[in-house]
Amino acid sequence: MNVAVVGIGRIGLPLAAKIASQGHQVMGCDINAARVEQVNRGENPIPDEAGLGELLAKVVRAGHLRATTDTTAAVANCEVVLFAVAVDVNAEGTADLTSLLAAADSVAQGLRPGTLCIFDTTLPIGTTRKVLAPRLEATGLELGTDVFVAFSPERLLMGRIIEDLTKYPKVVGGVDPEGGRRAAAFYREVFGGEVMELANAETAELSKLSEGAYRDLNIALANELAMVADAHGVDFTEVSRAANSQPYCHLHVPGTGVGGHCIPVYPRFLIQGRGPSSLSALGRQVNDAMPGYAVERLAALVDGLAGKRVLILGLTFRPDVAVTPHTNAVDLLREFKARGADVRGHDALLSEEGARALGFEPAAAPFEGYDIVVVHAYHRAYAELDWARIAPVLLDARNALDRDQIEAQGVRYVGIGRPVSPA
């Protein structure tokens, strides 16, 4: 089978490599010429994605995966087209479909009758049917007769995408029944795992938004309960351990907000659509306020932040993955600077240019002489640091460190929903 994967970024490239590993001929399409050339050399542009480097080299060497910037030409030779183009929010907080619409227009120019098109990205409800499918009919093809369209959201965690591709059921929903049937058959063939064929594209779209809203709201609940714990001098780690011993309670871990491509974004797709969304909006408000809450708590502890030297370690949105969209490290930087602190940043996975692109003045090793150190993304590279040498106060932004080890070094530990170490 000939398959085109449009968008060979963090989701699309592992997806393309996995399909190619099953013996199918895959064309990876992208507007990034440098990435296309790198892939065609069999070089992995996403080194922190487990298993991708070896798999990519293998399928390129075998001739099962090639990349191109000519999406229209590639699609003309394919039976299936997968869209893996990321959708973010714009300045107004609504879905920015610009890149995906451009990709759909390029694909439409090369579609041949009988092609199956699957949108493998997260979208506001109704987008597949009302916005994207009509773009694919632009050259005169008829939906449901000449071109078949389905929606199938990615259900993957960056850093373990190849594992997750077959770990969870693949959800699909067609714009029409035949599109859904063909999409389900395609995924059963290329992945071999369980496929859940839902009633239509809208059902599948809402299923993915429900996953994101569930996580965002549960994190918001944990954050709110952690603030209650702070108000009463209670350790929320004990609270959650006790509460979660009951099988119907699943409290999450509190922290300084939610980052990444997914969880901060998808609730906004619900908020912008039809139907009630007050809970999703409230969850966003709670989580977005957490960086300011944590910094204000620190300010009260150290008698103000004006002139204080602050080091933020781990600028990506989560540990050991070099992904920075919507990272709360940027929010922490903003809050510290608003209170007059002198802030530096470091990330073991980013270059100095990458740190500067996020607005940080890069910190040079060795790290020492700061008033406060904030551990935002606890990369493995930071596990052996001498915290006492760095600063007398440590903010554990994700409650990820061992409090006893920090205090044993004579450093005051500050967590979210955890009593502060005595002076």
Image (cartoon, rainbow, N blue to C red):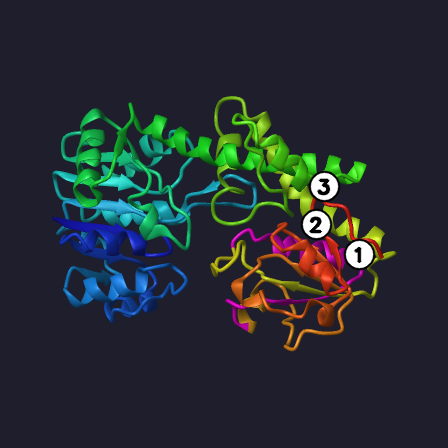
Q: Which residues are magenta?
A: 325-351
The circle on residue 415 is 2
The circle on residue 109 is none
**Rendered position, 312 above or below 99:** below
| In the displayed structure image, the side of residue 84 where residue 21 appears, left or right | left
Q: Callout 2, which amino acid?
A: Gly
Q: Is residue 347 visible?
A: no
When asked about the image quadrant of residue 146, the answer is top left
Residue 145 image offset from top left, x and y in percent:
14, 30
Label tally = 3
Residue at left offset 18%, top offset 28% = 178
Residue at left offset 59%, top offset 42% = 253
The residue pinned by badge 1 equals 339
Q: Callout 3, which amino acid?
A: Asp
| In the displayed structure image, the side of residue 274 where residue 120 appears, left or right | left
The circle on residue 235 is 3
